[in-house]
Image (cartoon, helix red, strand yellow):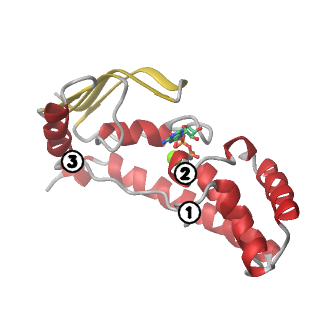
Amino acid sequence: MAVLRTEALCKAFAGRVIFEDVALELERGEALALMGASGSGKTTLLRCLNGLELADRGVVTVGDARIVAGDSHERLHEAVRAVRRRVGFVFQDAHLFSHRTVLENVMEGPRYVKKEGEPEAHARALSLLAKVGVAHRAGAYPRELSGGEQQRAASRARARDGSGDSVARRAHERARNRDRAETLVALFARLASPRAFRS
Ligand SMILES: Nc1ncnc2c1ncn2[C@@H]1O[C@H](COP(=O)(O)OP(=O)(O)OP(=O)(O)O)[C@@H](O)[C@H]1O
Ligand SMILES: [Mg+2]
């Protein structure tokens, strides 16, 4: 019997469809990796699995708990509590100011540390965001961004606040990403082994 199942799961943000009709099923002992471009909806789907985000349509079943989109507030609340007792979650984290937009985060250092003028800081922040492919999300708050978008915006915010040498940091980030990739491969190999699920 499946320990986790989604049926016809759909989610849109402000009319923009993030995913549609997602149906997946996991048996005990199975490991599943979601892969896709940054911003393609991986975290949003995971958030729907434990009720951090509610899908617009569809059903999430974890054991005997069911989150049914469109149910009453009380039933959803109860279902989410039941699901969370069974699902663990590890967050991506980028350390942006949550009360400021992405653009304001990138402008913060130049404006308040380097005392750069508003128009100049604004223009340069936008061009930096364009270089990492998130200029279209400049007016959004960090919680409205994907993890990778947040990390790319944060890299521009840090590059602009004068903290450290950016070439050294990029080399360090590359090394760290490589380490992480190797650690993840090892982790999935361990999870895929039936022994990982014995208690
Ligand atoms: N609360 C929100 N409001 C509006 N848009 C959002 C919100 N959360 C996420 N988005 C947008 O939905 C899309 C999917 O985001 P999601 O975080 O699921 O991506 P992801 O696949 O996990 O990306 P990454 O690999 O960068 O972590 C992105 O374009 C993001 O900007
Ligand atoms: Mg993500």
Whether residue 174 is visible here, answered yes or no, is: no
Answer left or right for 122 relative to 49.
right
* The C terminus sits in image quarter: bottom left
As drawn, 94 above or below 78 = below
Q: Position of residue 20 (x, y in %)?
A: 46, 20
Q: Position of residue 45 (x, y in %)?
A: 42, 36
Residue position marked by numbered label 3 in the rendering: 84
Q: Position of residue 149 (x, y in %)?
A: 63, 49
The type of residue carrying mark 1 is Ala
Residue position marked by numbered label 1 in the rendering: 94
Ligand 1 near label 2 (Cβ, under 8 Å)?
yes
Q: Position of residue 84 (x, y in %)?
A: 21, 47
Q: Are marks 2 and 1 in contact (CB under 8 Å)?
A: yes
Give me the C-alpha separation between circle 3 and circle 2.
21 Å
Q: Residue at x 86, y 60 (%)?
A: 119
Whether residue 60 is visible here, answered yes or no, is: yes
Viewer-proximal residue among 59 and 185: 59
Please tell me whether mark 1 sits on a helix, a strand or a loop: loop
Viewer-proximal residue among 199 and 80: 80
